Amino acid sequence: FCLHLPRDTLRIREAKIFSAVLRWSEAECIRRQLPVTPTNQRMVLGRAFNAIRFPLMSVEEFAMGPAQSGLLDDREMVQLFLYFTVNPKPNVGFLDTPRCCMTGKELTVNRFPQTESRWGYSGTTDRIRFTVDQRIFVVGFGLYGSYFGPTEYEVHLQIIHLTNKKVCGSNTTTFCCDGTDDTFRAMFKEPVEILPNTSYIASAKLKGTDSYYGTKGLRRVTVDCNNGEKVVFQFSYAAGNNNGTSVEDGQIPAIIFYI
């Protein structure tokens, strides 16, 4: 089991990998006739523990699982929570390279070259329509955070098929920001398949303080996939109540994906 943990090709989210590691370490303690304690669990895992890629989790997944397991020491806990909340990211001693759950590496499309302040939230959903020219798998959005300083937001993410209104993927999660105008990751629990030349709505309903927003938005963005391939995104106005987000201005500055 432990020999598989370093693999880049594991097709499973890191939070589920950690749950499997936890169960295996409990069983291994019992097999060795050791008390099932966090100290013994980490001991039986040995170097394999360092193959768990905690930085790939959402802050919510980390807080609900590893942070409560007792397997991490105090220094590791502090460094990992800092990793989730500040820029630049500290060195945490655990890989942050995405596993290739699709093919290749994680990619991001950014549709805004500039930011401004401020963007408000009153229970209305920010939405933008998009299409791509080849099949991709969306794993999350990059979102703007508060310009007042470090803040936590609750967010409900959705990707909706425009024609049949089917919800292709959704998740309610949290993300932390550090008061800069960077984008911050809010992730789906599972990758969302996006078909080529098909219109989808990217939707994010944020609960929190006023934030930065993007401006001078791009209608068409080409992402170089570093293997000679390119993915072309086209953004357009999502009709209806969208909290003011449009091609030109607003939230949902980035879509995180694999090909």
Image (spheres, rainbow, N blue to C red):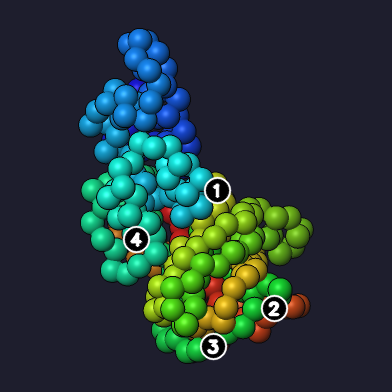
Q: Residue at x 34, y 26 (%)?
A: 41
Tell me which amino acid carries mark 2: Ser
Q: Residues within 10 Å of mark 3 (few under 14, many from 20)?
A: some
CA separation, marks 2 and 4? 29 Å
Check disc 1 and report the residue beneath it.
189
Q: Could you tell me if the residues under marks 1 and 3 are in contact, i.e. CB atoms within 8 Å?
A: no
Tell me which amino acid carries mark 1: Lys
Check disc 4 and report the residue beneath it.
82
Q: Could you tell me if the residues under marks 4 and 3 are in contact, i.e. CB atoms within 8 Å?
A: no
Q: Could you tell me if the residues under marks 1 and 2 are in contact, i.e. CB atoms within 8 Å?
A: no
- Which of the two marks, 2 or 4, is nearer to us in this view? 4
Depth check, front residue: 101 or 209:
209
- Which of the two marks, 1 or 3, is nearer to us in this view? 3
Q: Is residue 19 above or below residue 235?
A: above
Total marks shown come to: 4
Q: Earlier in the sequence, mark 4 or mark 1?
A: 4
Check disc 3 and report the residue beneath it.
118
Q: Earlier in the sequence, mark 4 or mark 3?
A: 4
Check disc 2 and report the residue beneath it.
122
Depth check, front residue: 56 or 99:
56
| Dot 2: element | loop
Residue 239, image x, y percentages = 73, 78
Q: Earlier in the sequence, mark 1 or mark 3?
A: 3
Residue 91, image x, y percentages = 23, 56
